[in-house]
Image (cartoon, helix red, strand yellow):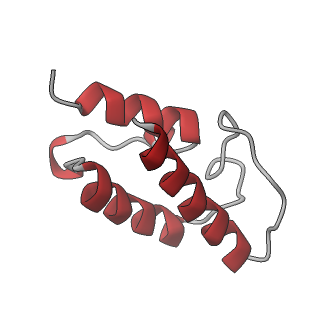
């Protein structure tokens, strides 16, 4: 994941947290969904965002919350699915 895409992802997460009244910062390795900071509705929006911006095809991926629970996890998933 390039720096621009990662910045865009962080902005998406920041806006999602702010919409839920959570203005606290977060680390790239911090769990966002399993910790309860973000909800399942936001997870669906994130999945759609990643399909559009990163070209991830979740229909061919066995979905697990661990794939999108942190910035680091998302970055690893995007990098793993990038064409060689």
Q: Nearer the viewer, residue 9 or 21?
A: 9
Q: Residue at x 34, y 36 (%)?
A: 78
Q: Residue at x 61, y 52 (%)?
A: 33
Note whether 7 is above or below 61 in the view shown.
Answer: below
Q: Nearer the viewer, residue 60 or 17?
A: 17
Residue 67 spot, x, y in % from top left = 44, 38
Indicate left or right for 60 with 67 as reference: left
Residue 16 spot, x, y in % from top left = 61, 69
Indicate left or right for 19 with 52 as reference: right
Q: Farthest residue to the top: give it.
A: 84
Residue 4 spot, x, y in % from top left = 46, 47
Indicate left or right for 62 with 73 as reference: left
Q: Residue at x 56, y 41 (%)?
A: 71
Residue 51 spot, x, y in % from top left = 26, 57
Find residue 64 and report its image quarter.
Answer: top left
Note whether 46 is above or below 29 in the view shown.
Answer: below
């Amino acid at each position: 994941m390039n720096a621009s895409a990662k910045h865009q992802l962080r902005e998406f997460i920041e806006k999602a947290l702010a919409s839920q009244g959570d203005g606290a910062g977060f680390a790239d390795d911090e769990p966002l969904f399993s910790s309860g900071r973000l909800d399942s509705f936001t997870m669906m929006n994130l999945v759609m965002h990643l399909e559009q911006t990163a070209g991830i095809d979740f229909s061919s991926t066995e979905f697990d919350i661990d794939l999108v629970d942190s910035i680091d996890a998302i970055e690893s998933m995007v990098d793993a699915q990038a064409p060689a």
